[in-house]
Amino acid sequence: MDFRYTDEQLALQDTLRRWIARDYDFERRRVLARSCAGYSSEAWAQYAELGLLGLPFPGEFGGLAGSGVDVMAVMELVGEGLLLEPYWSTVVLCGGLLRDCAPQAMKAALLPEITAGRLQLALAAYEAGGRYELEHVECTAVRAADGWRLSGRKAAVLDAPSANYFVVSACVDGRIALFLVPRTASGLTLAAYPTQSGSRAGDLQLADVLVTDDALVSPPGEGLASLERAVDLGIAALCAEALGIVTALNKATLSYLKSRKQFGAPIGTFQALQHRMADLYIAGEQIRSMTIVAAVNCETRDAAARRRAMSGAKAYVGEAARFVGQQAVQLHGAMGLVDELIVGHYFKRLTVIDLCLGDADFHLARYSDSLAAWSGC
């Protein structure tokens, strides 16, 4: 089987790479990370113009009907450029959830708005005390004459400050449902904060928030399966972002080893460092292989097989990317830690990616349990 990108995917990557070099260099990113919004609205408009915001959506909603591998190609460049815009949250995670699970009327109303760059979303599914377990939901939804009333708290909602709507999980008589909650809803409060990688997140408090019946994304009893499917899409995209970062880190580290001199010679001529650089490239190729596994399997209908593939990829990529990040920082010496060098920023983002949607330890345990169940042990 040929796992190379198609000519169209390579052309899209080349377009993105040129745009990043021209309009989104590292100094520009540092300025954006310190800004109030934490990202560029002009860049978001450019995403829409390039068709990126509608990449995974059907053509009837203005999208391009892209596959998981198409999203991988884009997310690899998101990692390489350390882009700050909420592409992953809005398009991949929440957009994918709406595409696969929302009522037709909701899709028709929201997906074209996402594609046009006029709407941003964030997933509010995790709660304090639940670690990475999606079924840990204490937020409740109670039927009311005029719709549903939601009460509870959601923690670490990624890209929450920029979201127009939140996809919120809540329990209805012990069963999980998903609701679309507008940012402006009465009773909804947001405590925003920056993340270690320069993006934004926030905690939500819902105090008797009223939403109408047409805000129901996934009905009681179906919400957990919808969440798991969306999170699997998100995991595959995160692996691709980590791949882009690792590729860029290896390139930057090799360039440094060739230029930094000690004892009158480039340190890249030292055999011990050559061996370490070889280890980094081997890890990068292994990350690419596991990312391909995730991208190919992220949309399969077999939930157990999909979950097993996603957990295997996330666990491996998390551990291998941490190794590459640590080695790259060390091989750059003291320069690897300074804010003015992109290497430290890459490492921070890899650390945050490992923690998103379940860290390496969590997914290693889930992968082990999945293999045991699959084999009948």
Image: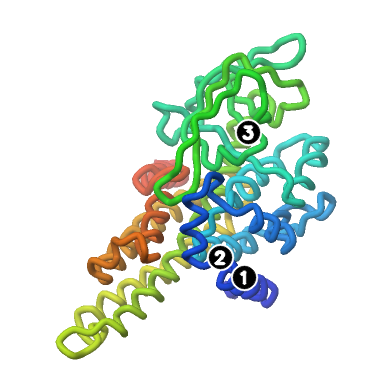
Residue sitting at 63 percent across and 26 percent down?
177
Residue 184 shown left or right of residue 196 in the figure: right
| Amino acid type assigned to the residue bearing label 3 in the image | Val
Q: Position of residue 224 (x, y in %)?
A: 58, 32
Q: Which of marks 2 and 3 precedes in the sequence?
A: 2
**Could you tell me which residue is drawn at 35 percent across and 79 percent down?**
254
Question: Quadrant location of residue 264?
Answer: bottom left
Task: Give the residue number, with chain letter if any, for mark 2.
Answer: 24
Res 167 label: 3
The N terminus appears in which quarter of the rendering?
A: bottom right
Badge 3 or badge 1: first in the primary sequence: 1
- Say if 352 sits above or below 222 in the image: below
Mark 3 or 2: the one toward you: 2
- Would you say 150 lies left or right of 115 here? left
Image quarter of residue 189? top right
Q: Is residue 83 above or below residue 156?
A: below
Q: Are marks 1 and 2 in contact (CB under 8 Å)?
A: yes
Three-letter residue code for mark 2:
Tyr
Query: Which residue is denoted by mark 1 in the rendering?
Result: 19
Asked if residue 376 lies left or right of residue 329, the reply is: right
In the image, residue 174 above or below residue 162: above
- Within the image, what quadrant is residue 194 found in? top left
Q: Residue at x 77, y 13 (%)?
A: 146
Q: Residue 276 versus residue 372: which sits nearer the camera?
A: 276
> Which residue is situated farthest in the left direction here?
263
Give the Cα distance between marks 3 and 1.
Answer: 31 Å
Q: Secondary structure at mark 3?
A: strand
Which badge, 1 or 2, comes first in the chain's sequence?
A: 1
